[in-house]
Amino acid sequence: MRLGIFGGSFNPVHVGHLRIAIEVRETLELDQVDMVPVASPPHKEASDLLPFWLRCLILKAAVKQAPGLALNDLEALLPEPSYTHRTLSAYREILPDAELYFILGASDLLLLDLWYRGREMHELANFVVVPRFGKDLQAVADFVPQFWPDAERLSACAHSAQPSNCQACWRLPSGNLLQYVHAPGLDVSATDIRYRFLDGRSLVYLVPSEVEQVLMERREEVRRIWSVRPEGK
Ligand code: ATP
């Protein structure tokens, strides 16, 4: 099985996340992409984070219309905080024969040094990097050899169903790949969606209608939590 793993706060999930998951699944011919909400985030200021069960409920509604995407809530069962290294290790244990593809935005890759055991994470899964916040192929191409001096740039990506969409590919020291996949940049963020919701503005076309429906059904609780501004914002 070729399985994509897309982790995030998903506070809430939006069309930017969903398109990325679909694009990567199609480009790399993955059987499935798991959306993995963080249970107990180690990095982010978490005061305006909806409870895990509610983010899961929203994700479940979001993936209903998206064949090949699924929710995996395994982080609820793992020790806190939710380090990605632990999540990927758990995947390796549960699915020892699966080929794992960990998906992340380029701006997150550039901060990998700050992640718990970030330098070793490539031992657990292949990496799939997508553009984000203007951090694109050039930023990734500068970062990879500096972070993993033994990484080997491959001349062509033989592992993609649509090679023109996989714009660059490296073999990392573990033998796993880091692939840079071109995906249409949708300028959407969960932060922006939270502000719109608090302002009473429409979320139509920014989140699936099923997501907006869940948010509206629970608007009192959602408003209360999202109104808490994290420090520094
Ligand atoms: P927030 O605004 O709350 O920081 P976010 O929209 O960045 O949230 P996350 O849940 O933190 O969403 O993101 C999970 C992953 O999805 C990260 O790797 C992030 O880079 C990526 N991502 C989020 N939004 C997009 C987007 N519009 N295009 C591409 N990647 C995205």
Image (cartoon, rainbow, N blue to C red):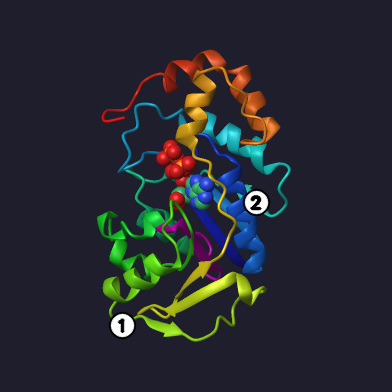
Q: Nearer the viewer, residue 70 or 46?
A: 46
Q: Residue at horizontal 49%, vertical 75%?
A: 168
User: Within the magenta stretch, is there residue 50?
Assistant: no
Q: Residue at horizontal 27%, vertical 73%?
A: 146
Q: Residue at horizontal 43%, vertical 51%?
A: 133
Q: Which residue is mark 2?
A: 69
Tally of numbered tags: 2
Q: Is residue 209 left or right of residue 74?
A: right
Q: Earlier in the sequence, mark 2 or mark 1?
A: 2
Q: Quadrant of residue 110?
A: bottom left
Q: Which residues are magenta?
A: 94-106
Disc 1 under 8 Å from ligand 1? The reply is no
- Tag 1 secondary structure: loop
Q: Nearer the viewer, mark 2 or mark 1?
A: 1
Q: Which residue is mark 1?
A: 150
- Tag 2 secondary structure: strand
Amino acid type, mark 1: Asp
Q: Mark 2 to mark 1: distance in Å?
A: 33 Å
Image x and y of residue 104, in percent: 46, 57
Going by the picture, which residue comes out furthest to the bottom? 155
Image x and y of residue 212, in percent: 64, 27
Q: Which mark is residue 122?
A: none
Residue 107 visible in the displayed image: yes
Q: Are marks 2 and 1 in contact (CB under 8 Å)?
A: no
Disc 2 under 8 Å from ligand 1? The reply is no
Q: Residues within 10 Å of mark 2 (few under 14, many from 20)?
A: many
Q: Is residue 10 above or below residue 134?
A: above
Q: Is residue 231 left or right of residue 210?
A: left
Q: Quadrant of the N terminus?
A: bottom right
Q: Quadrant of residue 208?
A: top right
User: Within the magenta stretch, is there residue 103?
Assistant: yes
Q: Is residue 214 above or below residue 126?
A: above
